[in-house]
Image (spheres, rainbow, N blue to C red):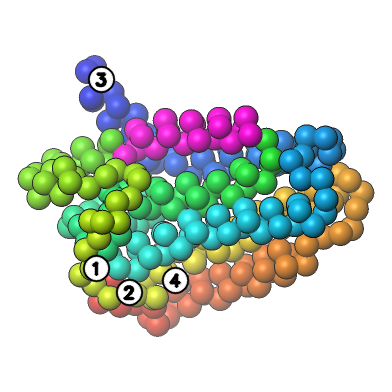
Amino acid sequence: MALQEEFESQGIWLFRYRGSLPIIILIIAIYFYIQSQLNPTLNCFQTEQAVTYFEYFCLAISLLGLYIRSYTVGHTPNNTSGRNVTEQVADTVNTTGIYSTLRHPLYLGNFFMWLGPALLTQNWWFNIAFGFFYWVYYERIMFAEEQFLRKKFGTMYTDWAAKTPAFIPSFTKFVKPNLPFSWKKVIKKEKNGLAATFLIFALFNIAGNYVQHKTTYNGFFITAAVLSSLLYIILKYIKSNTNILNEEGR
C-alpha cells in the first residue's frame, strides 16, 4: 500500500475511535497528577495560593478550547463540523468565519480542551509527550478528512486549502461568517463539553485531596461540575423529547 493510501486508511480508522483518546489522556494524566500530589518536590508551585491560581489557569485553557469549538459549530450549516462517529460527513465546504483562518478549528479546540488537564499534572515530560501524541494522532485524521473533501469537492476545496493554514490560525485572512451564530446548534452539538470539562477538573481535585488525606476541596470546581451535569441532563432531555432546539438548515 502506498504511503498516501496508508495514511488515509490509518486516519479513517483513528477517526472512528477518536473518542477514546481523551480517556487515555485522562487516565495517564491522573496518574501523573497523583504522583505530583504525593511528592510535593515534583510540583512547580509550592504554595496553596499559587497552585489554586494555576488550576484556574488550566481551566481557562480548557474553556478556550470549548469556546473555539462552540464558535466554530455555531456558524456552520447542518451536516458540517459535527460529532460524526463512524464516517466523514460534509454537504459543503466551510470557508468563512473561523474556517477562513485555519482548516481544522475543531481539532484546535480539542487540543486546548485536553491541554488543560494535561497541564494540571505539572509534569512537563508528560505534556511534551501529549503534544507529540496529539500531533501524530490527529495528523492522520486530518489527512483522511482532507482526502475525503478533496475527492468530493475538487478544486472548490483545494483552492481554499491552498491559502488557508491547517492548524495554526492566520487572523489576517479572516472573512465574516456567512451564517449568524446559532446557540441552538451549539447546545445540541456541544452540550457535553462544559459538563465534561468541569467533571474532569473536579475529579482531579477530589483525587488530589484523597491521596493526601485532605478535605480542602475546590468548591467552585465541584459546584460547577454538579450544575453543568444537571444542565446537560436537562438539555439532553429537551433535545430528545422536544423540537425546541431544532432549527432549519442548522
Q: Please say if 228 is above or below 109.
A: below
Q: Is residue 38 magenta?
A: no
Q: Position of residue 240 (x, y in %)?
A: 45, 72
Give, as a single range, the part of the protein colored magenta: 124-142
Q: How many marks?
A: 4
Q: Residue 177 got which mark? A: 1
Q: Kindly indicate whether the residue at mark 1 contacts the one at mark 2 (C-beta within 8 angstroms).
A: yes
Residue 250 placement: quadrant = bottom left
Residue designated by label 3: 3
Residue 35 placement: quadrant = top right
Instruction: Select label 3 or label 2 by which is in front.
Output: 2
Residue positioned most to the front: 172
Q: Please say if 53 is above or below 150.
A: below
Residue positioned most to the top: 1
The N terminus appears in which quarter of the rendering?
top left
Label 4 crowd (10 A; few <14 / some 14-19 / many >=20): some
Three-letter residue code for mark 4: Ile
Q: Earlier in the sequence, mark 3 or mark 4?
A: 3
CA distance separating discs 3 and 1: 36 Å
Residue designated by label 2: 181
Secondary structure of the residue carrying numbered label 4: helix
Secondary structure of the residue carrying numbered label 3: helix
Three-letter residue code for mark 3: Leu
